[in-house]
Image (cartoon, rainbow, N blue to C red):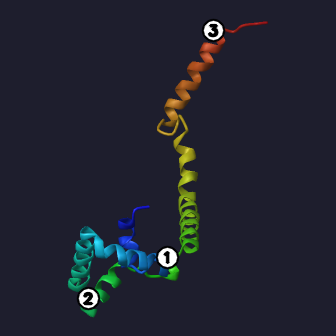
Amino acid sequence: MNVCDNLPLYLYGELNEQDKEIFKRHLLSCRECRENMQIFKEIQENKKVCVAPKRVIDAVFEKTTRKPPLLIFSKSFKTVFALAACFLAVILAAPYKKDARFNNNVYADTSIEEIINIDSELDEFESDFMFYA
């Protein structure tokens, strides 16, 4: 491994004592590592820590944090409400189902006289075409 590759490890204090001494001696002879080390030190010195005001942090936290759901809108209550709504719909629709039976009757809009006429016509048809087995 090239000694120059140890620069990041040296900068972050990750080298053991022996490798640290080797790298310090290397710095005396390597201009590129000294320049890179100087750049790193300047960056570290000029690095600014930005902190937002507390009210801004609280506002962002308030908008992004999930609040616990209200008890009435939890999953189990949604299921109970859905079942109750279905049950109520069935109960309210029951009277209309009885009326629907009469709407299926063929003679619902036919007067009694028309029914008697149809019945007599059927009797005549049966008498004209009486089949005996």
Sequence-wise, the earlier of marks 2 and 3 is 2
Work out which quarter of the rendered image holds the C terminus and state it. Answer: top right
Q: In the rendered structure, are the residues bearing label 2 and label 3 in contact, judged by CB atoms less than 8 Å apart?
A: no
Q: Residue at x 47, y 38 (%)?
A: 109
Coordinates of residue 78 in the picture (x, y in percent): 53, 70
Q: Position of residue 41 (x, y in %)?
A: 25, 81
Q: Position of residue 29 (x, y in %)?
A: 29, 72
Give the label, 1 or 2, closer to the camera: 2
Rate crowding at label 3 as few (under 14), some (14 to 19) or many (20 or more) other CA atoms within 10 Å: few
User: For residue 51, which numbered disc appears in the image?
Assistant: 2
Query: Does residue 121 appear left or right of residue 51 in this picture?
Result: right
Tell me the residue that label 1 is attached to. Answer: 73
Q: Badge 1: few (under 14), some or many (20 or more) residues near its Cα, within 10 Å?
A: few
Label 2 element class: loop
- Looking at the rendered structure, the kind of residue marked 3 is Asp
> In 3D space, how far apart are the residues under numbered discs 2 and 3 (Cα atoms)?
106 Å
Mark 3 = which residue? 128
Which residue is rendered at x = 42% and y = 79% of the image? 21
Give whichever of discs 3 and 1 has the lower sequence position: 1
- Name the residue: 65% across, 12% down: 127
Label total for image: 3
Distance of label 1 from label 2 (alpha carbons):
38 Å
Find numbered disc 3 in the image and state the secondary structure of the residue it sits on: helix
First in sequence: mark 1 vs mark 2:
2
